[in-house]
Image (cartoon, rainbow, N blue to C red):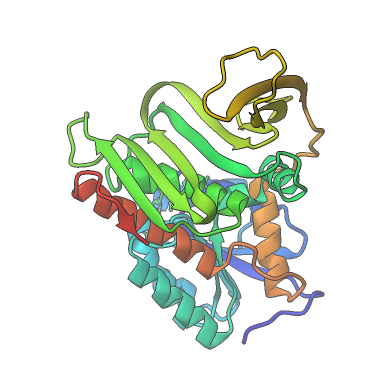
Amino acid sequence: MNRISGDSKVRIAVVGAGYWGPNLIRNVARLPQASLDCVCDQRPSRLERIRAQYPVRTVTTELNEVLADSAVDAVILATPPETHGEIGLEILESGRHLLVEKPMAMTAAEAERLVEEAAARELVLLVGHTFEFNAAVLKVRKLIAAGEIGDVYYLHSQRVNLGKVRTNCNALWSLAPHDVSIANFLFGERPLWVRASGYKFLDQELEDVVFLNLGYPQNRVAHIHVSWLDPDKVRRTTVVGSRKMIVYDDMSHDAKVKVFDKGVSKQAVTTEALEAPPFGEFVFLTHTGDVWIPKIDFAEPLHQEVAHFVACIQGREKPRTGGLNGLAVVRALEGAQESLARGGATVEL
Ligand SMILES: NC(=O)c1ccc[n+]([C@@H]2O[C@H](COP(=O)([O-])OP(=O)(O)OC[C@H]3O[C@@H](n4cnc5c(N)ncnc54)[C@H](O)[C@@H]3O)[C@@H](O)[C@H]2O)c1
């Protein structure tokens, strides 16, 4: 085990400084308990930009140099998803703690291998499911756990906008890891089955638009729509419960979470006058009450995630989005990919 005491700074290397890596680098650089020791990217131009902005000890285009550098305690991996399985394993085998961006890997077999290696070496393995560190998502989960909305029936989620069009993975693997992780987190369960349909409109072999359904224990369902071919930027999750409903809108600045006192209840027919004609022995009555906007103290989720990674390495916290969490998401995505290939067939997970 490579545990570091709470007094010592964790020396971090970030591998991959493309679009997302600089956000991780910025957060490592501002964390008092960590030092930005090394940045690695195959493209020298990316390294020049980082060097100009941050006091990083060393930069390199070679992953091997990072792995051979005894001053590095931990690595944050922000390379493209198809490289995570192989590079992630090399990092763990070199004895470094690993924070791997989402999706953790492109196959469940690769994700399982990372989980095994981290466990065997007693290393921290964290997966970058940023939304599980988002104060609004945490608030929604807290409300659900407190019974505020009654029994949870289902949720639906939209993550759509124009671009960024990926050429290395489809919209499912690029965008849906977030929504699957949010659904697993809010339900507190892993999905049992998945069904997906997807459509290729642009000139490539990848789905630009994907709709997926995930079935959870107790007949709960999550419906997820992801796309990089849409006029509006929408990041919204709606959770419908037996007593109330919650809308989490990540695009809203002042009302990220709204709790609607709305619902439908089934009531036995009495002899009293009814608003609607009875069907059998029951009628369904709707109620509409207030809308409540809880106060949320928002901190940058990525900062929370990176700080949590460091706290886990220092033994102060336990991984909240550890390897098994990441594996569950990859299993759901792999099942969804199989469903896409089989014309939307149900795939048991
Ligand atoms: N958590 C989030 O909200 C979020 C948002 C965007 C992207 N991501 C994830 O971040 C990861 C990176 O995405 P991106 O959009 O930055 O991709 P990108 O293609 O813009 O950047 C990847 C970088 O990795 C470098 N690279 C590739 N292989 C390498 C290797 N072997 N050694 C060193 N450098 C290498 C490339 O040169 C490139 O600069 C992906 O897993 C993606 O899913 C997460």
Viewer-closest of 326 and 265: 265
Position of 9 with respect to 58 (left or right) is right
Picture mark count: 0
Viewer-closest of 197 and 99: 197
Position of 327 with respect to 126 (left or right) is left
Toward which corner of the image does residue 16 lie, by quadrant?
bottom left
Instruction: Look at the image and tell me whether residue 349 can be seen.
Output: yes
Q: State the quadrant of the C terminus.
A: bottom left
Q: Position of residue 120 (x, y in %)?
A: 51, 87
Position of 253 with respect to 95 (left or right) is right
Q: Residue at x 50, y 59 (%)?
A: 190
Viewer-closest of 15 and 146: 146
Q: Position of residue 111 (x, y in %)?
A: 41, 69
In this view, 121 is above or below 146: below
Toward which corner of the image does residue 172 lie, by quadrant?
top left
In this view, 118 is above or below 148: below
Q: Position of residue 270 (x, y in %)?
A: 69, 24
Q: State the quadrant of the N terminus.
A: bottom right
Q: Residue at x 70, y 13 (%)?
A: 273
In this view, 279 is above or below 312: above
Going by the picture, which residue comes out furthest to the front? 271
Viewer-closest of 222 and 3: 222
Q: Residue at x 53, y 32 (%)?
A: 235
Instruction: Look at the image and tell me whether residue 59 can be seen.
Output: no
Q: Position of residue 313 (x, y in %)?
A: 68, 73
Position of 180 with respect to 302 (left or right) is left
